[in-house]
Amino acid sequence: IKGLDYLKLRIGGGAVGNQNTPSGSPTPPYTQLITFNTNGFGPGNFVRNIGNLDLQWESVTTYNAGVDISLFNRKVDITLDVYKKTTENMLLFSSVPNFLGLSSVQPPILNAGKMSNKGIDLAITTYNVNKKNFTWKTNFIFSHYKNVLDELISKTSSLDGRIQFNTVTVTHTVPGQPVGSFYGGITNGLFTLADATGGLIPVQFDLPAAISASTAGTWAGDIRFKDISGPGGKPDGKIDNFDVTFIGSPHPKFTYGLTNNFKYKDFDLSLFLQGSYGAKIYNYLRRQLEGIENLYSNQLNTVLNRYTATNTGATMPRFTFNNKNNTSVSDRFVEDGSYLRIQNISIGYNVPKNIAKKALMSNVRIYASAQNLYTFTKYTGYDPEIGAFNRTITQMNIDNGHYPNPRSFTVGINAEF
């Protein structure tokens, strides 16, 4: 085939086991506690998590096929892989009801069910210029996958991602949905004074309309939630658990990276960009810093533009002690996590060998680099690259004060003698 220099087809498969438990699961389940009293020090133990004698290894089975192609006198190299990865007997914390009273005790780990990932990975390398004094090489990578929970140990069970000492449920996972999907109400603006005085405010999550701005209940400036369903599957004029739905996925539609390497005589320059598109982030930190529901938490200055009697055009709800619905889990705090980051820029200079030899060195390279230089994103938090809270897949992309990736600058010399 004209222009085709190399072609290789690949196919493979395999299975591996995993016994690593989720982060935060103490081993052993009892933790020693040393106390001091009138009789001196005394050893003791307290329960940290509930054991599970029926626990089995998690297994991951992977099948993949790929192709390696080289074109146009090795000026273009392409690697393409498709895969399917199935995880069975997933090791996860169970979702248990609050009435069990576990509090700070971790719920038991169990083999929760089966999950699959199907995806495609693409890498393209091009040798754009190859002259005596100048070379330019480009590498592009692209990755897309689809995640879905196939089954759970019980047809009526679900996996919930909870934070804040297991008191706030942020994600809800059921078969057929991506793992760690955000789950809450859909907001529809704010109630107006005309709604409040005209008796147009419905019951929202068991909270009725208030009599006035200072009484318990929903009033002008509070969040209006969409009525999307009811017991009969249609909107019924009130807001309740039938109106809670999936409000975003933490999984990106695709990720990508682009690297360009230039070399001109003794100088070299490298630029690496990386990005992600389509993932959602639940900004729990903003929920805390824009909650305006008590007098004892510091708030962002954005709350100065909240709803008041003289600022009825605001999009941020009013300050109130009497309506916790304003800070309930909803799409109010779900943000676009797409980003493009200048991950690395480095520039170097190779000192000519005749000069290096005068200093009794064979090679000398002077370089400077910048890491995490700038990120283009609409996300309002510190860093859209979050990962999984507590390394748990049911708590991905929950920003609960995630420490951002640092920006660093480096200057150095590599010398060989």
Image: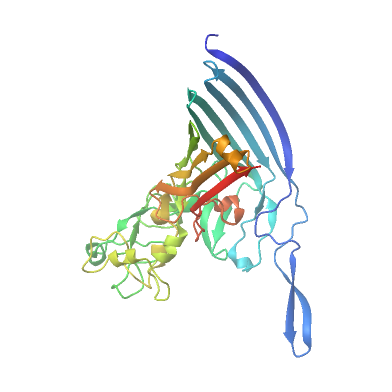
Q: Residue furthest front?
A: 358
Q: Residue furthest top?
A: 1
Q: Position of residue 413 (x, y in %)?
A: 56, 47
> In the image, is 24 to the left or to the right of 178?
right
- Vertical relation: 217 (above or below) 229: below
Residue 187 appears in the figure = yes
Residue nearest the viewer, comparing 14 with 3: 3
- Vertical relation: 176 (above or below) 291: above
Residue nearest the viewer, comparing 57 with 398: 398
Q: Quadrant of the N terminus?
A: top right
> In the image, is 40 to the left or to the right of 141?
right
Q: Kindly identify the residue that appears in the image at 46 percent across and 50 percent down.
A: 384
- Vertical relation: 307 (above or below) 241: below
Q: Quadrant of the C terminus?
A: top right
Q: Position of residue 218 (x, y in %)?
A: 34, 66
Q: Kindly identify the residue that appears in the image at 74 percent across and 57 percent down.
A: 52
Q: Position of residue 262 (x, y in %)?
A: 47, 32
Q: Kindly identify the residue that appears in the image at 71 percent across and 51 percent down.
A: 20
> In the image, is 110 to the left or to the right of 187?
right
Q: Position of residue 345 (x, y in %)?
A: 47, 43
Q: Kindly identify the residue that appears in the image at 48 percent across and 49 percent down.
A: 372
Q: Residue furthest bottom?
A: 38
Task: Residue 34: name its quadrant.
Answer: bottom right
Residue 180 appears in the figure = no
Residue nearest the viewer, comparing 195 with 166: 166
> How many numbered circles does the render carry?
0
